[in-house]
Structure formats: structure tokens, C-alpha cells
Amino acid sequence: MAWNTVGKPEDIENGKMKEFDVSGKKIVISNFDNKYYAIDALCSHMGGDLGKGKTNGGVVVCPKHHAQFDLKTGKVTKNINGLFKMMTKKDAKDLKLYDTKVEDGNLMIDL
Ligand code: FES
């Protein structure tokens, strides 16, 4: 693991998220009251791009089959169901959560 600078804290508005490419890995970082949370941007179900998902409070909805993940923890808050579940026969799993910090005015992630 190593600290990587991804941008400035002010790049992400309070209550919003933004996708970053960090050493070839897609990461979503969200800002809640100037605390920053970083999770994998590829959905654990079938690789949907969570950076393109809708957010609702602290949750991001996968644009592919609509699993929902807590942006602060990476945990699944609502798994896929119905037709998508029947078609894919697999569940979404909790996403990896990465440490973040703000240092010298830079937003950093431990990856
Ligand atoms: S790829 Fe995200 S819910 Fe299926």
C-alpha cells in the first residue's frame, strides 16, 4: 500500500462522489462533511461503473443491475433482485474501502 495524491479536497462537493483513476484502478471517493471515503468503482456483481451511478444520500446505485452500496463503508445496502438475480445467479459483495487523508492541501488515498 502507498499513498497516492488524487487531487484537491475541494474537487469533491460535500455529499457528492467522484471517480478517479489511481494507478490504473478505478476508485470512487465521496465527501461527507469534509471526511473522505474511497471504495472500488467497479461493482462487485458484474463490474458496473459506480462512478456513473446515482447517489441517494450516502448510497450509490449501480447503473447496471441496481445493487446499492454505502459510500462510507463499501457494504452492500441492497442486493440485486428480481429478474437480474434470476439472470445472473450471483450477488453483489461488499466493496473494498481504502484509507484517505488530506495532507498539505492534497487529497490522498492509500492504495
Ligand atoms: S454490475 Fe452492479 S449490480 Fe450488477
Image: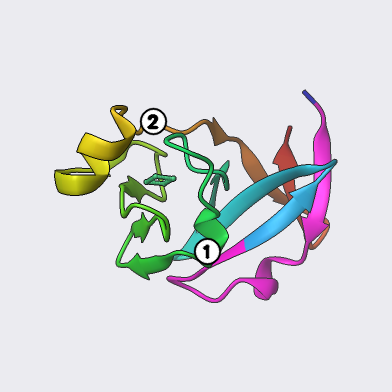
x and y, in percent, of residue 79 in the image: 24, 40
Q: Residues within 10 Å of mark 1 (few under 14, many from 20)?
A: some
Task: Identify residue type, mark 2.
Answer: Asp
Instruction: Please check the rendered image and state whether residue 9 is part of the magenta-colored stretch, yes or no.
Output: yes
Nearer the observer: mark 1 or 2; the answer is: 2
In the structure shown, which secondary structural element does the residue marked by tag 1 occupy? loop
User: Relative to residue 7, is residue 68 depicted above or below?
Assistant: above
User: Relative to residue 100, is residue 59 depicted above or below?
Assistant: below
Q: Which mark is residue 96?
A: none
Q: Quadrant of ligand 1?
A: top left
In the structure shown, which secondary structural element does the residue marked by tag 2 occupy? loop
Which residue corresponds to mark 2? Answer: 94
Task: Identify residue type, mark 1.
Answer: Asn
Asked whether the residues under the numbered discs 1 and 2 touch, taking CB atoms below 8 Å apart as contact, a structural biologist would say no
Q: Quadrant of the N terminus?
A: top right
**Sooner in the amino-acid sequence: mark 1 or mark 2:** 1
Residues in magenta, as a range: 2-18
Residue placed most toward the observer, 98 or 41 = 41
The coloring applied to the image is rainbow
x and y, in percent, of residue 60 in the image: 38, 58
User: Relative to residue 56, is residue 20 depicted above or below?
Assistant: above
Residue 48 appears in the figure: yes
Residue that extends furthest to the top in the rendered view of this protein? 1
Residue placed most toward the observer, 72 or 77 = 77
- Image point (42%, 55%), residue name: 64
